Amino acid sequence: MNWEPISSPNHEIKDVKKTLQDPEVHLSWFWPKEIDFVYIYKTSADSVKPISEIDERELKLYTREEYKVSQGYVGRLDTIGRTAYRILPCQKREGKLIVFMQENEKNLIYITGSRAKIYFSIAYKNKLFQSRKKVKMSIMTELPIEKELLVYVKKSGGVPISLEDGSVYPFIRDFPAGKTVTPEIEIDKNEFIRIFFNNGKKSAQHYELIPD
């Protein structure tokens, strides 16, 4: 790629704005008249690279004509958490595309999409005159998740209300996208179970845990 330091403020992309309609985002920005094309760099907010480290395969070329037709740029939020977009100005000179290294924050925007949903249900099977009961847990997730993300908590006398409100147990297998039904387990008749995030607020930034 033909990188050049940005030579004039008149070449800068700025005033980047967003309209979010999950899972799509509509971006618009001030497009200087001297700029023929832009490159759009999209990544997770935790993985933004310095411009010098960006590979051409990570960039999408976007023309002024495409911008006019769509009245901006329409992208898809296909990752959880925050997504970063950086708009890099380009000029065409003697058949070559020059990319300006605009490294300020004017051409950078962060977007928070919706959290991925995880639904869970817990079914109890009581037997008459038995001191123990069987439990089956079902987990429905939009995205594959690692087993370490979730735990279940068991409490005597009532349903647990937090990780600290009972005994904590791990899951033994990862969860693929879709519905997973765990093998039945046995607990005392007066015990109850609830599923929680293992790391609490950190996971809650990216996922929503919903009783089904």
Image (cartoon, helix red, strand yellow):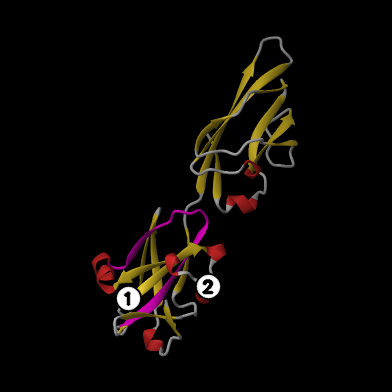
Residue range (magenta): 71-92
Compared with 120, 114 (above or below) is below
Residue highlighted by disc 1: 37
- The answer to which image quadrant residue 192 occupies is top right
Give the overall secondary structure of the magenta segment: strand
Q: Residue at x 43, y 56 (%)?
A: 77
User: SS of the residue at dot 1?
Assistant: strand
Q: Earlier in the sequence, mark 2 or mark 1?
A: 1
Q: Residue at x 50, y 39 (%)?
A: 177
The kind of residue on which mark 2 rests is Glu
* Point 65% across, 34% down: residue: 194
Q: Amino acid at mark 1?
A: Phe
Quickly name the residue at label 2: 53
- Quick check: 47 above or below 117? below
201 displayed left or right of 8: right
In the displayed image of the protein, which residue is found farthest to the bottom? 8
Q: Residue 125 location in percent, x, y? A: 62, 18
